[in-house]
Image: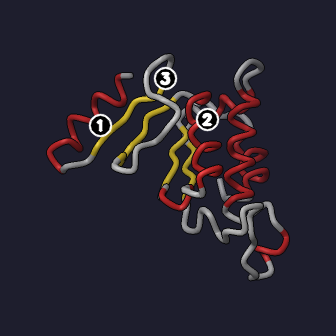
Amino acid sequence: MVQAEHLEALLEPLGRHVRSYYGNQGGGALPKDTSVAVCTIEKANSLINRLLEEGRLSEVGIIVIDELHMVGDQSRGYLLELMLTKLRYAVGEGNAESSSGESSGTSSGKTDPAHGLQIVGMSATLPNVSAVADWLQVSA
């Protein structure tokens, strides 16, 4: 992935590790020394699942989704929607208890697995930006 190569060139001198997850690149795990993971939708969904299972989602500070308009894609959009829904739920937006100020627990008994997680969506061609913003409960 070209994006990963550019990030590696910028971040390697700073001691940051960039990992690529696409096709058959990258395994199912996210090493703890990873600063940036560049992923396809499928690999990102798999990594998020793994981090949730391991109780490590709190290690992620920001998720940047390029090509957010893919949420409407007939073949791959459902995975992006599923991942965003999981992330929203994990940060408490999908949990009524969380909106009342109480800490919500996960099935493993851990609280706030993604406290402070930011999700940034980017797209130059998102025709339904208002609908997506409403769904994500953010301002467009």
Q: Residue sitting at 77 percent across and 61 percent down?
A: 107
Local crowd at mark 2 within 10 Å, few (<14), some, or many (≥20)? some
Q: CA distance from mark 3 to mark 2?
A: 11 Å
Label 1 sits on residue: 7
Q: Earlier in the sequence, mark 3 or mark 1?
A: 1
Three-letter amino acid code of the residue under disc 2: Ser
Q: Nearer the viewer, residue 128 or 101?
A: 101
Q: Residue sitting at 79 percent across and 60 percent down?
A: 94
Q: Nearer the viewer, residue 15 or 52?
A: 52
Residue lying at the far right in this picture: please name it: 96
Q: Earlier in the sequence, mark 1 or mark 2?
A: 1
- Quadrant in the picture for the N terminus: top left
Secondary element at tag 2: helix
Label 2 sits on residue: 46
Label 3 sits on residue: 22
Q: CA distance from mark 1 to mark 2?
A: 22 Å
Q: Earlier in the sequence, mark 3 or mark 2?
A: 3
Image coordinates for residue 56, horizontal then vertical, percent: 54, 56
Secondary element at tag 3: loop
Local crowd at mark 1 within 10 Å, few (<14), some, or many (≥20)? some
